[in-house]
Amino acid sequence: MKHKKAPGCYNEQRRAVRLGKLIKSGGAGSVYFLADDPSRVAKIYHPNIDTGYYQRKLSAMLAQRPEIPAPADGEAIVQLAWPDYLLFDERKRVIGFVMPVLDTRRTIELEYILQSRQAKAQNLPEGIGAKVSLACNLATLVSALHARQHRVIDMKPVNLRFYRDSLYIALLDCDGFSIQGEGERFPAGQFTPDYLAPEFQRIGQVPGEQEEAQDRFSLAVIIFQLLNHGIHPYSGRAQAAKVPDDLPGRIAAGCYAYGINAAKNISPVPASTHHLLPAGLRKLFDRAFSDSPAQRPSADEWAKILRPYALRSTQKIVLCSKKHQHFAGMPCLVCAREKQVVEGIKQAKQHKRTQTVSPKPAPAKRQPRVAPAAAVPRQPTGPGPLTLLWRNMRSKVPAFVWHGALAVISTLVMAILARNFTQLSGPWHAWYDNAALILIFVWIAMMGLLAILRSKP
């Protein structure tokens, strides 16, 4: 994708300023290298921006430049991307400004040093001494802004950079700050909910007269994260059903779990070592996260209490037997955290084992007793063709007719057999002849009786 051609621009003396390569483009404008000055860059606003508003705001920034203390080693470094002079177009309208360039190779986002794993991956110092120094330098820089009545508003770790070697803080996009001009306030354009003070969570904005209260809150949150392994002061484990799940909701509800008199509806993150911070720092955090915005420590107050810990000569940070840095007179933060992590892993494994142990099998239901094979009655099979024929015929002819016919046929058969039997020769001929007659009559009587009984329904 081709970038648009850089516009022609001039300084206040109407001298042409040549723009170089485009660095980045944002919501308000684009940043370019200067072709003739490698120590500076130019920010050119987009055409749809109200340049009249920005002309007044930038003029106020030039008139009220903060006085930042010089670094201890005397090196000139960029800590504020503050305007040096304005840029105009051919019609003398303000279209941007020139500011000092920040060396991105020497600096890195503050986010990377909050947690030990990220710090180690980026080759950054992991000890508490470096983090105290960063906190002190940030508070000093914000204090210088507040001295000129300027406010950062959208202050968060990803918007802050620091020098790897000296640990000085650098603030970018300063034209997005809330700037105090001569009789006019130029408010900031945005904020981040996770760093917004409780009183503003409910209304979703930062009133101009209360902007310093917002800076004091977000500054305290970042310092807490620096000194407590990146843990947000409103994170933790809910101890009540009504505790919100999101950070903005917890901020609005005052769910601060790390105070000397902590909230009861939430407990600290298990890996937190806030209880090993000096009492003076803990008291400042309690004031910063109390229900009263008026009690929040100023940036200058933070800088004054942190500075002695940042100086090596004071010996307020010492080494433990394992060469870990910790606050003098307090147990080692790193050793305590390592112990807590190991205990947490053990508890997690124990919990996993209890969840994965096979449950005892349920007692088997007693099956009904089955009779031996010999005792099981034989199941009837389906009727054969002759049986079906017989049933069909029986359904059409009354039963007594069938039984009567059977009796007659049986009598005739027996009569024939008896007659043949009585014709045998022998001395018993007369006896046989009488017996045959008697047998015939008995058979007839039996068949008749059977026919009568079986014909009944």
Image (cartoon, grey):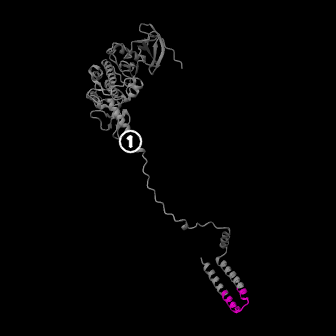
Q: Position of residue 403 (x, y in %)?
A: 65, 79
For residue 397, above or below residue 42: below
The picture places residue 378, in percent across and down from the top left corner, at 58, 67
Does residue 112 appear to the left or right of 387 in the view shown? left
- On the rendered image, what quadrant is the N terminus found in? top right
Can residue 47 be seen here? The reply is no
Pick the front one: 109 or 454: 109
Q: Nearer the viewer, residue 268 or 420?
A: 420
Can residue 446 be seen here? The reply is: yes
Describe residue 453's horizontal placement relative to residue 152 as left or right: right
- Figure disc tally: 1
Amino acid at pointer 1: Gln
Q: Is residue 150 magenta?
A: no
Nearer the observer, 251 or 348: 348
Q: Which residue is mark 1?
A: 350
Horizontal and vertical percent position of residue 160: 38, 22
The magenta segment is 418-439
Q: Quadrant of residue 427?
A: bottom right
Observer-nearest residue: 79 or 18?
79
